[in-house]
Amino acid sequence: MALLVVWPAGAAIAVEISQRQSSAVVDEAAALGESSDGPDERVLWRLLQAKKYRELKRQLAVLQQHYPAWKPPSDLLKSLQAPAPGFRVQTQAKKTARKPQPSIKRVFLCEDLPDQWRQAEWHLPSHPDQAIAHYHRLISHCPFRVKQQTLEVAQGKLQPADFVLLVQLSSAYLPPQAIDHFRFEAMKNQWLAEKPGNLAEHEQAVGQISALLAKTRDSRLAAMIGWRFFDLRAYNQAADWFKQSANWEPSNDDALYGRLLALEKLGDHSQALSLYAQIKQPTKPMRALAARSYKAKAWQAFDRQQFDQAEQLTVQAQQLAGQEPEITELKAWIAKQTSRYDEAALGFGELYRQTPKENYARPYVQSLALVDRQMLADRAAQAGGMMLREYQRFQAKELYERKQFQSAYQLAPKLFPALAAIDSPGIDGGAYLRYKSGEDGLGRLDLFKAPVASAFYTGAGNHLFKLELSRIQLYSGQPERCRSAIGGLPPDNPSQTACRNNPNLFFSPTTRLDHALEIDFSYRREGWLSPFVRVGTTPIGGLLAPTITFDVGFVQQTEFGHWGLNAYSQPIRQSILSYTGIQDPYRNPGGSSLEWGRVVRTGVKSSLFYRFNDDWNASGSVDAAFVEGKNVEQNTSIAVSANIGRNLSLGGFDYFSVGPSFNYEHYANNLSHFTYGHGGYFSPEHYINTGLGVNFLTKEGRPYVVKGRLSAGVQIINEASSPWFPLNNDPFGFYPGDHRFGEAFDFELKGVWLISSQFQIGAGAAVRKTSGYEDYSGGLFVRYYFNSRKASFSTDLPDTMFSTMY
C-alpha cells in the first residue's frame, strides 16, 4: 500500500533548497554506489537506524527533487512516522496529491513544538533561509500561543537580520501590537549586532529604530544608544539620549552616569555638577566624576586668576575625592600665585617625593627660592638628579633675565642654545665723535676718538677681561683775542686792553689736543654677585700729566631686582680745561705761565633697581663725590635720581618702559668758569630735571639688538655767584649768579647686528639739550669673534660709545 504525504500548500512559500545542498546529497549517494535510475537507499536506512530523523527528512526531500521518478520505500516512511519538511511523495497510481484532514495536519505540525523548533534550528547556521521557512510554517498555521512562542524561540536562534525578515513575514498572522513588539525586538537585536563604523551609520540606524523606541520607552536601549554616540565622540547626542533614558527610567544609574560623562567631555562642568546635585544616591563613579568637575572648574578659575574661587572649588573636590595628587597640586599652585610660598613649596615638595618629575620640581624650586635660598641650595645639592638640574635651570633663567648671559649659559647651556659661544674672545675697532656747544675756546668741545681698538677674553666661563686703547683729539674753537674770560687776567679788566696793545704780551690759548692716548683695562665676573674693576688714565699726551682713573664695585642680584655699590674716579669731559687742562693764554714771551685743569670726580655711588611685578619697576641712585684738579678749587657734589617705569608688553621688545623721572644735583661751589682756579665744568648750586621717559630694548637672542632711551621734561638751574679767581684769599671780583628755567631733552640709541657668525657691526647716536647747551654724539664699530656666534645680546652693545665721552 502506497502512502501519500502532502504538506500544506501555504508552508511551501518560504522553502528553498539550495543547489549546494542537492549536490552534496547526490555526491554522497554516488559515493555509496547509486545507479542513474535512483539513489542508493542504504544511506536512508542507516540514518533511520541511527535515529537521525532530521537528517533523514532532509535527505528524502533532496532526493525527491533530484530523482522525480523515484519513490521512497513505504516501510521507511512508516517507520519515520513523520514526513520530512519541504517535499511531496506520490504513488504511481495517483498523479495528484491528496490533502490531509485539517485536524491531522494541526496535530502533526503544532503539537510537537520542541521537535519542530529543533528541526528549524538544525538548518542553522549554514542555511538560515530554510530555518526561516520552518518557523514561518509554524507561525502561519498554528494558534496564537504557538505563534508567539515560535517567534520568541526564533529570536534567540536567528541572526538579527534574519529575525527581522521572519517578523516581516509574520506580520499577517499576529496583531499589530505583537508585531510592533517583535519588530522592535528584531531591530533592537539587529542594532546591537551591527556596530556602526562611523557616526553617519549610527545616526541612520538610530533613525530607523527611534519611532518604535518612543513607543516602547526602552530606557536600557536608549542608554546603549547614548553609549554608542559617546564612543563615536558625538557627546551632544550622547547627552541627549542619556537624558531621554533617565526620563523613562529615573533610577537608571547607567544613563545618569553616561550623561555626566558626556557633559564632562563637552566641558560643561557646571551642568554636570548641577545634575550631580539632583542625584539622591550617587554611585562611587559619579562621585569621582563630580570631583573631576570641581577640579576642572578650579583650574579654570585659576587660569582666570580668580584664586579665591579656585580654592573653594578645590575644597569641594577634596570632600569627594580626598587628598589626592591633583588636589595637592591645585592647592600648591594657588598658594604660589597668592604669595604663600611656604605652602606652595610644601605641596610641590610632597608631590615630587611621591612622583619625581619636572612639573613638580620646577615650581618647588621657584617657591622655595622665595622662602629660603640657602635651604633650596642645600636640598638641591642633597637630592641631586632632576632637582639639582631644575635648581640650576632656575638660576640660569634668573641670570638670563638679569642679562648675566655667560653665567646663565654656563649653568644650563641646553636651555639657551642661542647663547652658544657667548664667551667667545674677540677684537673690535671703531670711531666716535662728539660735539658740545658753548663759547669758542671755553665751553665748546669737539671730541674725536679714532681709532678705538679693544680686545676681550672670557676665562672660566664668566670672567671677562677687556683692554681698550683710544686715540683722542680735542678742539674747543678759537676765543676772541684778549677779550674772553679766560686765564690769569680778570674779565673786563683794563689790562686786557694793554694786552691788545702791548706787543710784548701775546694771547695764546689752549684750543687743541692731538694724538693723545687713553688706556682702559676692565675685569668683570658675571653671576648673582658681579664684582668689577676698571683702571685707566686720563689722556696721555695732554698739556698736563695724566692721572689714574678707576671704577671698583659690585652688583648684587636679588629676587626683587638688583643693587650695586661702587667707588670711582673719572674725568669730567665737559671742556678741554676740565678734561686735559690748559695754559694761561696771557703770558710774556719766554716767560712761564700758569697751568690748571684736568678735573676728576672721585666718589661713591649706590644704585637700586626694584621690580614690583612684571608691569611696574622703580630705580634710583645716590652719588656723592669730591671734585678736584690741578690748580683748581676743590669742590663737592651730591646727585640723586629716581625713576618709575610701567612696562608695556609689546611684541619684539624685551622691555618697553614708560614713566616719570626726577634728577637733582648740587655742588658746593660754582666752578663752571675758565679763569685761573675754575674747572670749566657745570657745577650748579641746584639742578632739577623732571619729565617723562621711555626706555626700551628689543628681544634678546636675535641677529640684531637695539637699545634706546628718550626723555623730555623741564629743568631748573640755579648757579651761585663765584669769584673770578677762587684760589685767591682776597678775590678781585665775582661772577654773578644765574637762574634759568627751560626744556630738557635726552635721546640715545645704539644697536648691534651680527652680519655673520663671526662679524658684528654696531652704531649709535645721542642728542642732549641741558644746562644751556646742546650735545651731539655718534659712533660705529666692527667686531670680530674668534668663535662662531648665533645671535646678538644686549651685553654686546658698546658701553664705551657714550660712557667714555661724557
Image: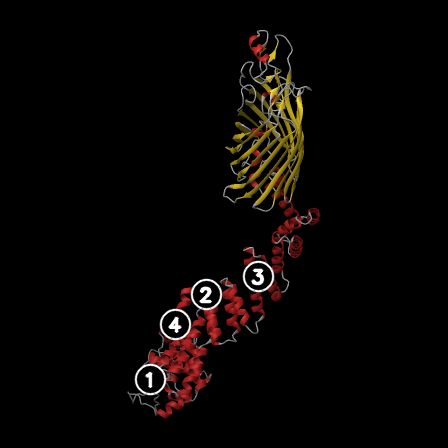
What is the quadrant of the C terminus in the image? top right
In 3D space, how far apart are the residues under numbered discs 1 and 3 (Cα atoms)? 68 Å
Inspect the image, locate mark 3, and give the three-letter code of the amino acid beneath it. Answer: Lys
In 3D space, how far apart are the residues under numbered discs 2 and 3 (Cα atoms)? 22 Å
Residue 764 visible in the snapshot:
no
Label 4 neighbour load within 10 Å: few <14, some 14-19, many 20+ = few
Question: Is label 3 in contact with label 4 (beta carbons under 8 Å)?
Answer: no
Q: Earlier in the sequence, mark 3 or mark 4?
A: 4
Label 1 neighbour load within 10 Å: few <14, some 14-19, many 20+ = few
Return the x and y of residue 156 as percentages of the image width and height: 46, 78
What is the quadrant of the N terminus in the image? bottom left
Q: Is residue 281 above or below residue 732?
A: below
Q: Picture quarter containing residue 784?
A: top right
Question: Is label 4 in contact with label 1 (beta carbons under 8 Å)?
Answer: no
Inspect the image, locate mark 1, and give the three-letter code of the amino acid beneath it. Answer: Gly
In 3D space, how far apart are the residues under numbered discs 3 and 4 (Cα atoms)? 40 Å
Residue shown at the point (51%, 66%) measured from the top left: 271
Inspect the image, locate mark 2, and give the three-letter code of the amino acid beneath it. Answer: Asn
Question: Label 2: which residue?
Answer: 236
Question: Label 1: which residue?
Answer: 10
Tell me, for residue 295, which label it has, or none.
3
